[in-house]
Image: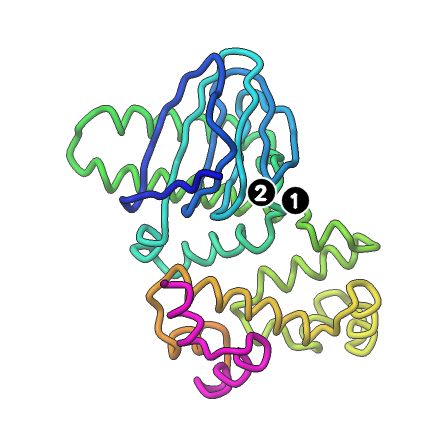
């Protein structure tokens, strides 16, 4: 299977095809695909789903991907790698992390809000114009437009159940997990007392209910989700351990190191070296 690399921080590509001849492949970068025109089938990780205009798909590193084109189609690709991520603000990287850890990596369109489809289309059309016209501050404008599309994608992911959420037995459990995901950087909001007050139930009931729904205690789930975020930060950013400690509310670096090694078998620094290779 072909492995595709990206040798610059980001790349924009407008593709018009009557048939798509590319073999199934994997990327080492992130890719967003917006369908401007046409119909066919999008295939991600061997899952198929029809596509049509105004659909937005997210393809993550190591996802397998191809198209089956039924009618002449026009795609706009936004590709970016970890080099691009390292130039962005902490808040923006957090939005991407939310997408990364809550998307089900399927060929479904992630735009769940009807009004967001024409909004994203207008942003994509603006990107195409900006990419063609060599105006002052072109790169800055392009980055702002890309980041706005990412923000809209993150907003829509909140409305789309992830693979984990799809397995839940009730809407209340879905809301509970969404609350944790959105407050993962606010330790005070993750205390049982705070969560119980937000959902108007007792702290004991929340812990028992949570474990019944997904097979993990509340604290175990919070820990496992934080570990995923730490992995993402180590792989795709230049953040130092002390910065991650502060951001995720650990008591100190030794606490984070012990926890990471306990669950992952290696220290954060060893993990970073392995993914860098």
Image coordinates of residue 135 in percent, x first then y, are 17, 30
Q: Secondary structure at mark 1?
A: loop
Location of the C terminus by quadrant is bottom left
The residue that label 1 is drawn on is: 160
Image coordinates of residue 264 in percent, x first then y, are 56, 74
Q: Which residues are magenta?
A: 251-277
Q: Are marks 1 and 2 in contact (CB under 8 Å)?
A: yes
Q: Residue at x 41, y 58 (%)?
A: 91
In the displayed structure image, the side of residue 191 where residue 55 appears, left or right: left
Q: Secondary structure at mark 2?
A: helix
Q: How far, Cα to Cα, is label 1 from label 2?
A: 7 Å
Which residue occupies the foreground of this view, 254 or 152?
254
The dominant secondary structure in magenta is helix
Q: How is the image coloured?
A: rainbow
Q: Residue at x 55, y 70 (%)?
A: 227
How crowded pointer 2 is (Cα within 10 Å; few <14, some 14-19, many 20+) is rated as: some
Image coordinates of residue 210 in percent, x first then y, are 78, 68
Q: Is residue 249 above or below residue 168?
A: below
On whether residue 261 falls in the magenta region, the answer is yes
Q: Is residue 234 above or below residue 6?
A: below
How crowded pointer 1 is (Cα within 10 Å; few <14, some 14-19, many 20+) is rated as: some
In the displayed structure image, the side of residue 179 where residue 153 appears, left or right: left
Q: Residue furthest front?
A: 1
The residue that label 2 is drawn on is: 156
On whether residue 5 falls in the magenta region, the answer is no
Q: Which mark is residue 189?
A: none
Which residue occupies the foreground of this view, 159 or 79?
79
Image coordinates of residue 101 in percent, x first then y, are 57, 55
């Amino acid at each position: 299977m072909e492995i595709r690399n990206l040798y610059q921080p980001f790349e924009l590509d407008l593709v018009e095809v009557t048939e798509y001849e590319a073999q199934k492949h994997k990327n080492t970068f992130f890719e967003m695909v917006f369908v401007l025109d046409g119909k066919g089938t999008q295939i991600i990780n061997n899952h198929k789903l029809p596509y049509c205009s105004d659909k937005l798909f997210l393809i993550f590193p190591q996802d397998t991907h191809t198209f089956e084109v039924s009618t002449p189609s026009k795609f706009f690709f936004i590709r970016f790698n970890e080099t691009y991520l390292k130039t962005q603000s902490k808040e923006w990287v957090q939005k991407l992390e939310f997408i990364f850890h809550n998307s089900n990596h399927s060929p479904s369109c992630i735009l769940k809000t009807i009004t967001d489809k024409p909004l994203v289309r207008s942003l994509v059309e603006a990107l195409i114009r900006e990419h063609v016209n060599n105006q002052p501050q072109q790169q800055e404008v392009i980055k702002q437009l890309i980041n706005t599309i990412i923000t809209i994608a993150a907003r829509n992911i909140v409305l789309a159940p992830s693979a984990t959420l799809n397995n839940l037995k009730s809407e209340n459990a879905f809301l509970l997990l969404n609350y944790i995901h959105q407050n993962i950087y606010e330790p005070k909001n993750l205390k049982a007392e705070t969560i119980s007050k937000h959902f108007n139930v007792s702290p004991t009931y929340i812990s028992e209910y949570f474990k019944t729904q997904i097979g993990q205690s509340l604290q175990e789930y919070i820990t496992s989700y934080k570990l995923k975020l730490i992995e993402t930060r180590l792989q795709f950013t230049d953040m130092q351990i002390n910065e991650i400690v502060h951001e995720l509310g650990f008591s100190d670096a030794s606490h984070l190191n012990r926890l990471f090694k306990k669950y992952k078998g290696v220290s954060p620094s060893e993990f970073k070296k392995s993914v860098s290779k």
